[in-house]
Amino acid sequence: MSNEPNTFQQGRPATPSEVAYRDGYVQGRAKEQKNQSELDRQRLAADRARAQANESAASGLLLGLLVAAIAAAVGGTAFYLSRGSEAPVAPEVNVDVPDVPDANNITIETPDLPEINIEAPDLPEVNIEAPELPEVNLETPQAPNADLETTETSEPAPDETSAE
């Protein structure tokens, strides 16, 4: 490699366009590295600010809870001590309660009723005589039509003949 800035490795001199290209490439790379480092620095600063905001919010929340717990403890203690050792006294209330008799000892007094005498009217005397029933022999049952004589003939009546 030669020490001259305008020569290539092969030993021939570089053309002006090659030199401009090389110089532009080197300058562009340097500028891009500078831009990236600036963006990285801005991202890092934003990340630090976000982390600090989150830590501040968490710290504020914890501090608020701690202050609320202390206030509740102080308020509860003050309430407990302010009520004293005396038991609360209920106000006196005078209520007139009527006397109610005991349900087991109630006696019911019946009023004196006048005597009532109702006389029945004189009814006429009624004599009803029942006829005597005939005697029934219960020893041997009889057929209902046993007393009747059979007078039927086996010949058909002249009206009932059929003409064939």
Image: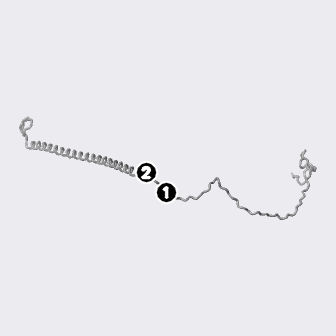
Q: Quadrant of residue 37?
A: top left
Q: Which mark is residue 86?
A: 2
Decide if residue 150 is in sight here: no
Q: Which residue is mark 1?
A: 92
In percent of the image, x 75 and y 63: which residue is there?
114
Label 2: state its secondary structure: loop
Horizontal relation, residue 81 to residue 158: left or right: left
Residue situated furthest front in the rendering: 86
In percent of the image, x 70 and y 61: which residue is there?
111
Picture quarter with the N terminus: top left
Residue 22, image x, y percentages: 11, 42
Q: Quadrant of residue 31?
A: top left
User: Within 10 Å of the Cα at label 2, are there few (<14), some (14-19), or many (20+) other Cα atoms?
Assistant: few
What is the three-letter code of the residue carrying label 1?
Glu
In percent of the image, x 7 and y 38: which residue is there?
7
Residue nearest the viewer, comparing 23 with 158? 23
Decide if residue 131 is in sight here: yes
Judging from the image, the colouring scheme is one colour
Residue situated furthest bottom in the rendering: 121
Image height of 73 relative to 118, above or below: above
User: Within 10 Å of the Cα at label 1, are there few (<14), some (14-19), or many (20+) other Cα atoms?
Assistant: few
Image height of 113 relative to 28, above or below: below
What is the three-letter code of the residue carrying label 2?
Glu
Residue nearest the viewer, comparing 90 with 28? 90
Horizontal relation, residue 118 to residue 147: left or right: left
